[in-house]
Image (spheres, rainbow, N blue to C red):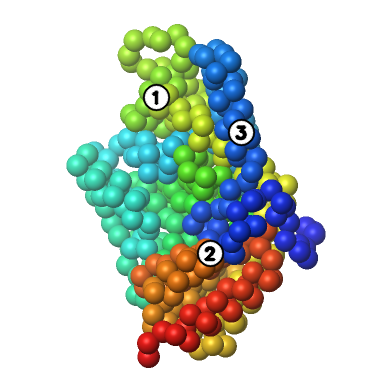
Amino acid sequence: MAETISAPLLRERFPTLERSTYLVSHSMGAAPVAARDALERYMDEWIADGPEAWVRWLPRIGEIADGIGTLVGAVPGSTFLGPNVSVLQAALATAIDFHGERNEVLYEALQFPSLTYVWKEWERYGARTKVVPSDDGRTIPTERICAAITERTALAVISHAYYVSGALADIASIQARCREVGALLCVDAYQTTGVVPYDVRALDLDIVTGGSHKWLCGGPGCGWIYVRPALLERLRPAVTGWMAHERPFSFEAAPIEYARSMYRFGHGTPTIPGYLVAQPGHAAIAEVGIRRIREHNIRLTTRIAEEALARGLRVNTPLDPAKRTGWIGIDFAGSERAYHELIARRVFLDYRPGCGLRVSPHFYTADEEIDRFFDELDAIRSKLPE
């Protein structure tokens, strides 16, 4: 059993924590100082070796991808990197044939908007989008999602946790339903990876996408995709480039010979700085351990929810820890104004319409920071107009 975190860990590696109360890791994880070191090393290698630096940089793509894969239980070689999830899911879209009767792409009404933009536009290429509605704007019954997945479904794109409420989806049941009807499932795990333990092999997931700048503390520019190894050969992305070739430095004319590995999800010249900067955050998550992070997070989010309810505030996140990811949504009259006031006082969180303040602790969060958040919130609310 994982050792419980009794105090915040690794705070000295995150200089932002010295000057702020940082409760926004669900949106942007705190920057590890080692990320700056990684960027400086990148510059040193570029300056010293010019194009010969590619010899070192290219293998690191696979190393960083496998590091993420380790966090989610993936076998080596089944995870790859991209600039962001929208691009990776667009590449996935090009690998699916929508010209037959199985032409539906199903997603939930609570899906992150960027991905809905991607899939809605794929109607230009034969896809038919199908949206599963929510009754309360925060959750969707698993049975409703499963019932909507039929023999016409080519792909279901489902959030592991809904960005508007933090509510977790039952992806195991949804994957099982996709298996029944022969559909593929793509899980967007951006909202959970690094704070909610899951294992892609134990869940037998088809495809998972995510990124680094939230709980993984890796900054923007390092998205990732996992593909169940048995599926890899059938996926031939048309969003492609020289990095997806089996022999990228042979510079052979078209048509492409796809890499036999996950490098087939490469595109053109990769965004090496974004990948390298992300790795120290990934390493910190691995060092602490996601199960320990989860225990610490549950303790502090439970306290946040209880403190909010004691003040008569509305909590828009599931109160059952097993049903939520790592943040608590708190709403009240004037919450948007309070958000701006809190930011001015360097209490970092964020605000979403229909949800209110989104507040998240991470492995580096101390109980005293929860105290400070509520002290500042109480002071601000006391001055809000009735």
Q: Say which of marks 3 and 2 sits in front.
A: 2
Residue labelled with disc 2: 346
Q: Earlier in the sequence, mark 2 or mark 1?
A: 1
Closest to the observer, 209 or 50: 50
Percent of width and height locating residue 286: 69, 46
Residues under labels 3 and 2: Cα distance? 27 Å
Q: Residues within 10 Å of mark 2 (few under 14, many from 20)?
A: some
Residue labelled with disc 1: 268
The correct choice, above or below, for 250 with respect to 203 in the image is: above
Q: Say which of marks 2 and 1 sits in front.
A: 2
* Quadrant for the N terminus in the image: bottom right
Image position of 378 (left or right of 202)? left
Amino acid beneath label 3? Ala
Q: Earlier in the sequence, mark 3 or mark 2?
A: 3
Percent of width and height locating residue 193: 57, 52
- Residue 321 found in image quarter: bottom right
Amino acid beneath label 1? Gly
The answer to whether the residues at label 3 and label 2 have Cβ atoms under 8 Å apart is no
Q: Earlier in the sequence, mark 1 or mark 3?
A: 3
Closest to the observer, 233 or 294: 294
Q: Report the residue at 47% width, 66% height from top.
A: 344
- SS at mark 3 in the image: helix
Image position of 371 (left or right of 152)? right
Q: Which label is found at residue 38?
A: 3
Residues under labels 2 and 1: Cα distance? 39 Å
- SS at mark 1 in the image: loop
Q: Report the residue at 78% width, 65% height from top.
A: 6
Q: Residues within 10 Å of mark 1 (few under 14, many from 20)?
A: few
Q: Report the residue at 34% width, 46% height from top.
A: 154
Q: Residue pushed farthest left?
A: 124
Q: Residues within 10 Å of mark 3 (few under 14, many from 20)?
A: some
